[in-house]
Amino acid sequence: MRSLHRLVRRNLKWSTCLVWLGLLTSGSLKAGVTVRFAGDSDVGEGGRWTRAVVEDWAKRTGNTVQYISRPNDASATLQQFQQYWAARSADVDAYMVDVIWQGIAAPHAVDLHKYVKEDELKQHFPRIVQNNTVNGKLVSLPMFTDAGILYYRTDLLQKYGLSGPPKTWEELAQMAKKIQDGERGAGHGDFQGFVFEGKASESVTCNAVEWIYSFGGGTVVSEDKKVTINNPNAAKALDTARSWVGTISPQGVTTYSEEEARNLWQAGNAAFMRNWPYAYALGQDPKSPISGKFDVTVLPKGGADGKNAACLGGWQVMVSAYSKVPDAAADMVRFLCSPEIQKKRAIDLSQLPTIPALYNDPDVLAKNGWFKNMQEVFNNAVARPSTATGADYNQVSTALYQNTNKVLAGGESGQNAVVQIERTCKRIVR
Amino acid sequence: MAREIDLQMRQRRLAWFLIMPAVLVVVLVIGYPLIQVIVYSFLKYKLDGVTPPSFIGLSNYAFIFTDPAFWGAVQVTLLFSFFSVILETVLGLAIAMVASSKFKGRTLLRVAILVPWAIPTVVSSQIWRWMFNDIYGVANILLADLHLIPHKLAWLANASTALPVIIAVDVWKTTPFMSLLLLAGLQLIPGDLYEAAAIDGATKVRQFWTITLPLVTPTLLVALIFRTLDALRVFDIFYVMVGGQGDLQTMAIYNQQYLIQFLDAGIGSAASVVILLFIMAFVVIYTRFSRTSFE
């Protein structure tokens, strides 16, 4: 002790310098930066889970994350983000962006090629990486992918002696009617045959794209910017969907988004549901009334010579071009999209990874045996016309969803609807 | 004499100096954005971060006036305004008359009737939206189970059922506001007029038509102007309850769609100017009407 005291006294100048140096450097090491992340919505599990994951990253790297929840509706989220981007705001460093916003978000995103090496990028589905690349710029990294799938009640199919999930929409309508009549006769007055999203927003756009493609009606706007919506198959697709409303689907389905449909389905009040994969884990939860009573498959074809269709969804993360801390934000983005976190997401939330290798991972398959079916789903994935229409996608989607919603509510025929959509698209897409 | 004029002029100058800061603030806060919106309405201007604005004259206005969606929105707005204002005024007056008479618990009543007005519109619209859900909404459960309607209805799915529902919700929300304004007007009527009329043998109904109504008319007109202008600009209740449905757009929703959803500042600004002119037309009509009713 006394020798130490003498040592310090003798080298006072140096010791003071050392102390200051220590204080300064340790201060900057501990503080880290604050990354503001506009992440998943707090409705449902996504928000809670993502918050926990980014907190984990923050702890690992000594940074802080300020989490901002997004609205549950995708259209509302886009409106909010577009305001940030138009104002070139530095208030948010990273955004969770939909697969269809790449063209809109491109001018406001940092090119992630700067932070992500080629072999890291090759781990993901090439089609998704291609979707996220606008004019050579990697706008965002994929977090999870999504596709519309058909949920069906295995116990009810068995009860009514129906074999296997339906292969065509006609089969589905027949099966749904049979089950619905049976259940309503047995006292479940509110039982519905088929629930889906008919709400006039991006929700019904996804459904419409699936119906139209499954009947061989194309993709509204083709990749070479030609407006292809006005054809008899597309009109037939919309009219078929209209025939379900009020017969096997509730009249109010035109106001349902994903959560309304899932609430009906999960309470056990529907035989079939079209929804995104996120509903699988929620439905299989032991507390759910339908736990263990359902399975999923690819959506039906429109007639024997139709095609299976699954609307490609999925969410990505981008770094804002106006961010003051792009390096830290990019690091967080890479963490969120890494195989380790995607595997955790597949197990915890049953959301589909964007990394093909994970579909053969034993832990993932143990929890989500149904992922094996997803290969077929992805082979039939149809993308919305967002790449072809770029920044005008919003208007194209609005024309599609307003007219589809009108057809479903009985206010317009399928033929009129496709003519209207074509007229609007031709004006927008030049 | 000269000193008086001098004093007047000094007072006037002082008055100007005192008002000047407030006028300046108003010009900056209201005038500047207004001029900017009017300027933008003559430009082709997309807020996507890449396209520069360009002058295109009256093209935005031409687009709006030839857009059937816009005229549909005008129709919806006018229908909504007409019915909701009439209902709110009649009900508001009735409630105000009840609240102005003396009885026990009068203060509690006055506080209680304000509750719908106090809840933020977005919150109460969402509550009503759930109540009118076709499968698990309270409205259907009550009406269908009491056999007042043949079967459960999807109220918000069709314009023909959704518009009455929305009007009803707005009446629920805004009648307190009208009743409060009219209550203030009723309080101004001297009580001895009623006493005199009662002594002369006038019935309550006669008293209402000859005393209450004429004397509350000035307040009524002010309340009507407030309410009509608000109704013409309605946005939140439609957006929350039936947002996105093309045949249930109001002018404000049409405006928001172009400005915020499509980030088209040109058409969005032109739509704002059109709505402004529309509302100004109503103000002119109202002031003309209220002036003649006094002559």
Image (spheres, rainbow, N blue to C red):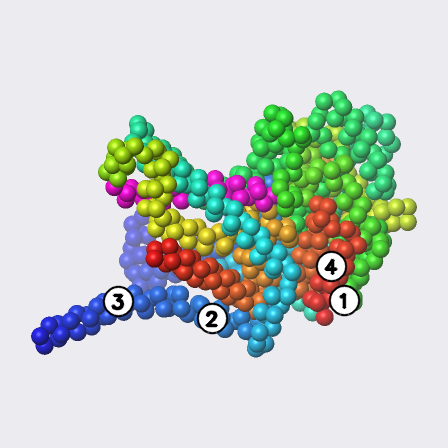
The residue pinned by badge 2 equals B36
Name the foreground residue: B157 vs A26.
B157
Q: Are marks 1 and 3 on the same chain?
A: no
- Which residue appears at 61% of the width and 50% of the height? B248
Rounded to the nearest whole Å, what is the CA distance between mark 4 and mark 1? Answer: 17 Å
Disc 4 is placed on an element classified as: helix
**Displayed quadrant of residue B94:** top left
Residue B270 drawn at (x, y percent): 54, 67
Rounded to the nearest whole Å, what is the CA distance between mark 4 and mark 2? Answer: 34 Å
**Amino acid type indicated by mark 4:** Gln
Name the foreground residue: A422 vs B48.
A422
- Which residue appears at 57% of the width and 41% of the height? B165
Asked whether the beta carbons under mark 4 and mark 2 sit within 8 Å of each other, the answer is no
**Chain where mark 4 sits:** A
- Which residue appears at 79% of the width and 54% of the height? A415
Disc 3 is placed on an element classified as: helix
**Amino acid type indicated by mark 3:** Ile
Would you call the spot at circle 2 few (<14 residues within 10 Å), some (14-19), or many (20 or more)?
A: few
**Amino acid type indicated by mark 1:** Lys
